[in-house]
Image (tube, helix red, strand yellow):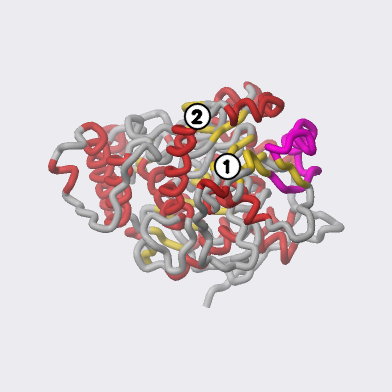
Amino acid sequence: MRRYTRKHHSSLILLAVISIAVASAIVVFKVSKGLSWHYLASPWTWTSTLGGPFSSRHVIDKRKEKAKEYINLERIWNDDSVKRRGKHRDGSLEMVEAVLAKARALIRDASLNPSNSSSSELPDSDYVPQGDIYRNPHTFHRSYLLMEKMFKIFVYEEGEPPLFHYGSCKDIYSMEGLFMSLMEQDTRYRTWDPNEAHVYFLPFSVVMILEHLFDPIIRDKAVMERTVVDYVGIISNKYPFWNRSIGVDHFMLSCHDWGPRATWYVKELYYNSIRVLCNANTSEYFNPKKDASFPEINLVTGEITNLTAHLPRSNRSILAFFAGNLYHGKIRALVFKHWKGKDNDIQIYEKLPVGVSYSEMMKKSRFCLCPSGHEVASPRIVEAIYAECVPVIISQNYVLPFSDVLRWESFSIQVAVSDIANLKNILMGISEERYDRMVENVKKVQKHFLVNDPPKRYDVFNMIIHSVWLRRLNVRIYS
């Protein structure tokens, strides 16, 4: 029986600030004794919207540069330095790291020597990634197959539903609940032996914490702090794994706007752990070297069948379409200001007329506008992909889902906020040949955004797992 006892204690903001201030000195010292950071730089390049190859430094002010480097993961410490310190070796950890070392070597080999026969030792009769929707299809294929063969995830059993091990599987935050549910049922990656695990999943649901504990009138955010802090305290006292790595091989997942906020209260969770977030905003210190972006999918009824639709191109008579709340962030306000009621080719609605279907409008449009709202992520991106409508992403500081694998520029248009007034010229300037190619790529990439229960290979569940796998490959933990 899972048990979880919530401690009732008050949060002290001053103490939190002091803790963050001294974090760098304390933890870099610890990390220098137990971690090293590896980069698979050849096959993987992190990208953010409107920015090309991603560098977080251009969006993080100097004032917090030191806090951002809470763990100096770029320092490499070799085995000899560990041996000289005479530390007791952890045999199970060394076996785990040996598996990951082999995977790194094979992935690098696949990247550098795609024709090498040793890179083809894992056959795949189901699906072989190819085409320009991938940054490096051969490397991705190799990595994915190794993940299926090797990767093990331990899910902490502590905690009771509905705050833990459970989440809503419909509406805009559906992916949080779906991942939780599918992970609980998983038999491919989940292990019941924590000693053989490569990563450890913290199964708290931000959506459920806020739904059941947060009072919208009192608005006491400390309920989230108490829940997350107490939970990490329980698993770190009961098991050795959190303290062994300072949380680096642990991950949480949230699609709620407050997902990043939920990690503020445990400094190791915020700075060290893998945070899998829909709200992947680099201006809010999302770090794509260790954090992973996953898509926001709005399953209105929870139904996951017939998500995609196929319409001949001749039916797409509308150049661009958007429908949504005007008062939902500054970017949408600019879209409405420049285009609502201004041009018949670009149809903008706050509310659709009676009898007009949202999904049918997407199916009739060549381009579907996906401006950010209050947060960077938008469910319209996946809705557009399902409708075979080329997404037009208008955002700032957004790290797109699976962008270390997918070439978003091959199946979407990214428009800077400063270019909203020039939107029609940008879209009209896309040649028919390029548009046809992008539509075909949208159809190809659908596979990676589909929700299946049970999961199917290369679908959105497996792509999320692959994103975690890549982040775990990037760090080595010494015993």
Q: Is residue 333 above or below residue 458?
A: above
What segment is highlighted magenta in the picture? 322-346
**How far apart are the two marked residues, 1 and 2, measured between alpha carbons?**
13 Å
Is disc 1 placed on a helix, strand or loop?
A: strand
x and y percentages locating residue 357 in the rendered image: 69, 58
Q: Earlier in the sequence, mark 1 or mark 2?
A: 1
6 or 123: nearer the viewer: 123
54 within the magenta span: no
- Residue 366 disc label: 1
View extreme (right): residue? 217
Amino acid at circle 2: Ser
Q: In this view, does 409 lie above or below 356?
A: above
Q: Is residue 91 left or right of residue 396?
A: left
Density class for disc 1 (Cα within 10 Å; few <14, some 14-19, many ≥20) is many
How many labels sit on residues? 2
163 or 233: nearer the viewer: 163
For the point 26% across and 35% down, the residue is 111
For the point 15% across and 38% down, the residue is 116
202 or 235: nearer the viewer: 202
Is disc 2 placed on a helix, strand or loop?
A: loop
x and y percentages locating residue 77 in the rendered image: 34, 32
Residue 279 appears in view: no
330 within the magenta span: yes
For the point 74% across and 34% down, the residue is 343
Residue 82 appears in view: yes
x and y percentages locating residue 229 in the rendered image: 63, 54
- Residue 149 disc label: none
Q: Name the residue under label 2.
A: 431
Q: In which quarter of the image is residue 19?
A: top right
